[in-house]
Image (tube, rainbow, N blue to C red):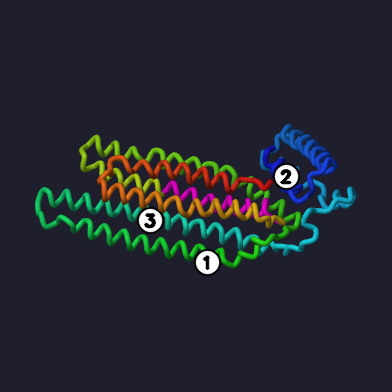
Amino acid sequence: METIMVYLDNMFAGLPRSPEVERMKQELLSGMEDKYLELKQEGRSENEAVGIVISEFGNIEELMEELGIQTEDASETYPVLTEEEVQAYLAAKRSAGFWTGLGVWLSSAGIAFLILMDTLFESLGSSSDQGTFGIGSVIGMSGMFVLAAVAVGMFIYSGMKLGRFEYMEKGFQLSRSLLMTIQRSKVSFALTYRVALITGVCLCILSPVFIFAGAYVNDTYAAYGVSALLATAGIGVFLFVYYGNIQGSYTTLLEEQHLNTARRKQETRVGQAVGVMIWPLATAFFLFTGLVYQRWDINWAIFPIVGILSGYISYYYENKKPS
């Protein structure tokens, strides 16, 4: 039922907030609720009931003409997206999310590799050859910078894939049939997105377990636990980025058509900027407190905290509705 209400809100988003429009919206919502409950009583599934209700929804343009209502943006003309353009956009967002998420994980894995090599060679050197001191740091730093370079390349590549869709920021239109198709796809994806978000948050929260387990064995293994924490938290962030990008593509298509207000664009930029900045800052804090103050024992906590914040920010900005 929530999906139907969201769909109705999207359909009325471009109309003026007058008593007449609100009354028409409430009447339509009441009819759709009755149809939805009737279908559920017949034994239809959630997706089937929502799809049928949406497909039987009246033509909003005809209702507007009957009431003599014009949209707030009637003076502006927006391009009508074809099914091929929509599918290409969805595929590009999915691909960009994969490469961006993988790049974030490689950045995290690079730091994990540095700590792993440094700890491993230090452990070997302390029991055998003093000359092995420093080799682990060199190998670890080299591996970290290689992985960071690959990650940056992935970020650039993902950005280039979305570059050709910049024209959509100025506003666009969708046919009613295509709008309903996208709505059904979003409904089908909703469970997957929630599971991915919950899994990512759980991975970030549970990742410190590796440190506790390692410390229980001995202090040296605690450093290995830090490496495992970074790799595991990186997987959680990958889930945020990848599935968040897919959810964001549906949000853009369903909730931002005809929408090019400065306020909404600013909100979108803020959400993206926070997501891009928060992980590099967390990594810099982690390295600074570890290398300068040798606080590897507690500075790992920044990653589960940032993981939770990142998941919340992703969910908030991908699901926030324009007002």
The residue indicated by pointer 3 is 107
The span picked out in magenta is: 235-257
Label 1 sits on a secondary structure element that is helix
> Which of the two labelled residues, at mark 2 and mark 3, occupies the earlier sequence position?
2
Mark 1 vs 2, N-terminal side:
2
Per the model, the C-alpha gap separating discs 2 and 3 is 40 Å
Amino acid type at mark 3: Ser
Marks 1 and 2 sit apart, C-alpha to C-alpha, by: 33 Å
Element type at mark 2: helix
Where residue 140 appears, x then y in whole percent?
26, 57
- In the image, residue 88 above or below residue 255: below
**Of residues 53 and 81, which is closer to you in this image?**
81
The answer to which image quadrant residue 50 occupies is top right
Q: Which residue is denoted by mark 1 in the rendering?
A: 160
What is the x, y in percent for residue 27? 82, 38
Q: Secondary structure at mark 3?
A: helix
Q: Quadrant of the N terminus?
A: top right
Residue at position x 41%, y 54% from top?
A: 280
Seen from the viewer's position, the closer of residues 49 and 127 is 127
